[in-house]
Amino acid sequence: MSLVFNIEKFIGEAITHRSESLFADDLKSFEVKLRTEIEGKKVLVIGGAGTIGSSYIRALVKYNPAKLIVVDINENGLTELVRDCRSRKDTPLPADFKTYPINFNDKVFAKIFNQEGPFDIVANFAAHKHVRSEKDIYSIEAMIDNNVIRAKGLLDLLLQAPPKHFFCVSTDKAANPVNVMGASKKLMEEVILSYSEKMKITTARFANVAFSNGSLLAGFIERVLKQQPLSCPADVKRFFVSPDESGQICLCACILGNSGEIFFPKLEEETMVKFADIVEPFLNKIGYDIKVCGTEEEARSEVSNIQNGTYPVYLFESNTSGEKMYEEFYTDDEDVDNNTYKAFGVIKNAERRKIDELETIIDTLKKVFESDNTDKKDIVVALGKMIPGFEHIETGLTLDQKM
């Protein structure tokens, strides 16, 4: 693989087809507000080692916060976050900067919160984000625990010393969800918004983040480094934003949004890109021609020909559970403001249930998980009763069954 491959440049040229950030004009228009609300302030970022969390941090530090505490269970990710920021020209980390490899649900986290706070800004990016993380009852329980139950626990802790700005990341899959991950994020939205009268809370739904950690595109790099074939759905089309853009939309939602608002990027349908259409430009960029294979077996056998300049790629029709063939950022029932910002849309009237109602929902989910006989279907049925219109797409196949 060519060592001169610039991922950020490739994303702009071959995926988003943008030479500058989609949000450049909004960042410029609201620069004074952003600087006023961030400069000299104390910030806590949870889940800051992931792609979106670290991109949020890179966007944030340009406005000179006085203090930055980053928490993430991924110790290696925190190490890379520090190395990346220290190696860039435009990411001036504050003098008071600390990273902690812990879970935000641990007792020690509460100690850090109390000793290092109070915080002016808190942003939470700790979440299960993959549809593949709903393969069975065990993975689903972990997902709902992280995305919903722990999110509520965090909010209860924040009420002890409410920040001026609290942000929790969501996903486009929360709009008319067809998988458990999207349903868990929809419940997460309702949980955090139920607290929106007690403190300022915002969130954001947005598109696939190109080459984000654990994504299909990031997997391309891993496969090439290991001289393994690529595998990609031929029919799945998605909206994409760059890692930098993902951090910028979260920062703007966090700082500029009013309590209870959900931000999303204004992207036109014609900007959607098929994963399969990214493969050949990617391979060409690193010096290979594409070799399309009809089966996984054929792709694995063709690896021996990589030295001849062709790279094997298995293209397949998507058939796994929970796979939504289109993307949407809001539903017909949601009131959307497309006028305040140039590139951000804002959902103004997202559903807000009462805290006690959501506590009942959480207790119900816990009881479902307590039964030794519970399986995935039981959770899907329970979520269907809690989220009107939730229709899970079940095919009996998971992404873990594919190359």
Image (spheres, helix red, strand yellow):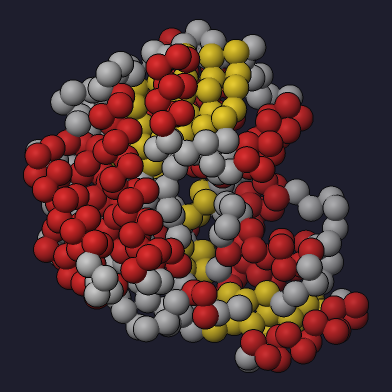
Q: Is residue 118 above or below residue 282?
A: above
Q: Is residue 69 above or below residue 317?
A: above
Query: Which sits in the foreground, 166 or 13?
Result: 166
Which corner quadrant holds the C terminus?
bottom right
- State left or right for residue 313 relative to residue 37: right
At 25% across and 29% down in the image, what residue appears? 156
Res. 256 image quadrant: top left
At 78% across and 77% down in the image, what residue appears? 311
Res. 275 image quadrant: bottom right
Which corner quadrant holds the N terminus?
bottom right
Task: Residue 284 in the image: state x and y as whole percent.
Answer: 77, 67
Extreme residue toward the right, this view = 307
Residue 57 visible in the shown view: no
Res. 336 image quadrant: top left
Task: Residue 167 in the image: state x and y as whole percent.
Answer: 36, 32
Q: Is residue 253 above or below residue 191?
A: above
- State left or right for residue 384 relative to residue 224: left
At 29% across and 47% down in the image, what residue appears? 148
Query: Which sits in the foreground, 134 or 174?
Result: 134
At 54% across and 84% down in the image, what residue appears? 316
Residue 376 visible in the shown view: yes
